[in-house]
Image: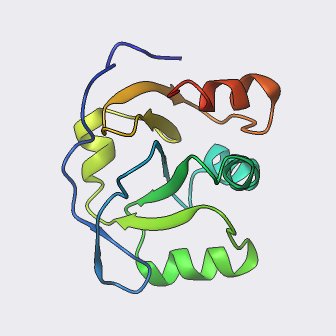
Amino acid sequence: MDRSHKGDAPPAATLTGLDGKPATLPTGKPLLVNLWATWCAPCLAELPALDRAAGLRADRLTVVAVDQGDDAAKVQAFLKGKPLAHVRPLLDREMTASLKLAANLPTTILYDATGKEIWRVTGGRDWTSAESLKLLDEDR
């Protein structure tokens, strides 16, 4: 658990949706950003739990999974076998977010409703555990 970046805004990055259209990080309520890639084993292991946790907190938290470096076709093919019901997938083809954050994958960052970082976690995690769900409630 890293709280040393508390208050930081998300790095500027050129994001796209799976449809190839430009996208931005959602605003208006707390945001959980998960940096991942299709080639990252810990990332893939935690995605189902991240999606379930997103469903449990859907009323008050937006969750996005920002793929680092893969093209849309590769992410679409991967997600076809493991669809995400509650997590919005986005693409960062240039890996700008992970490079600017000096982040290893997976890294997950919680931002408050004003867009300021609360904490970040590096490494795979069971997002449905009681401890993790408590962390997701820290923006209140």
Q: Determine whether, in the image, residue 93 is placed left or right of residue 31.
A: left
Q: Going 72% across and 38% down the picture, which residue do you hit?
A: 127
Q: Going 37% across and 62% down the picture, which residue do you hit?
A: 69
Q: Determine whether, in the image, residue 109 is placed left or right of residue 10.
A: right
Location of residue 132 (image quadrant): top right
Give coordinates of residue 34: x percent, y percent: 50, 47
Location of residue 9 (image quadrant): top left
Foreground: 4 or 112?
A: 112
Q: Going 35% across and 53% down the picture, which residue do you hit?
A: 27
**Image quadrant containing the N terminus:** top right
Location of residue 79 (image quadrant): bottom right
Q: Where is 137 relative to 51, above or below?
A: above
Give coordinates of residue 102: x percent, y percent: 30, 32
Q: Determine whether, in the image, residue 139 is placed left or right of residue 13.
A: right
Q: Going 31% across and 32% down the picture, which residue do you hit?
A: 116
Toward the top, the furthest residue is 4
Toward the right, the furthest residue is 129
Toward the left, the furthest residue is 12
Give coordinates of residue 36: x percent, y percent: 51, 52
Q: Where is 59 relative to 32, above or below?
A: below
Q: Where is 112 relative to 95, above or below?
A: above
Give coordinates of residue 94: x percent, y percent: 25, 61
Query: What coloring was used for the rendering?
Result: rainbow
Total number of numbered discs in the rendering? 0
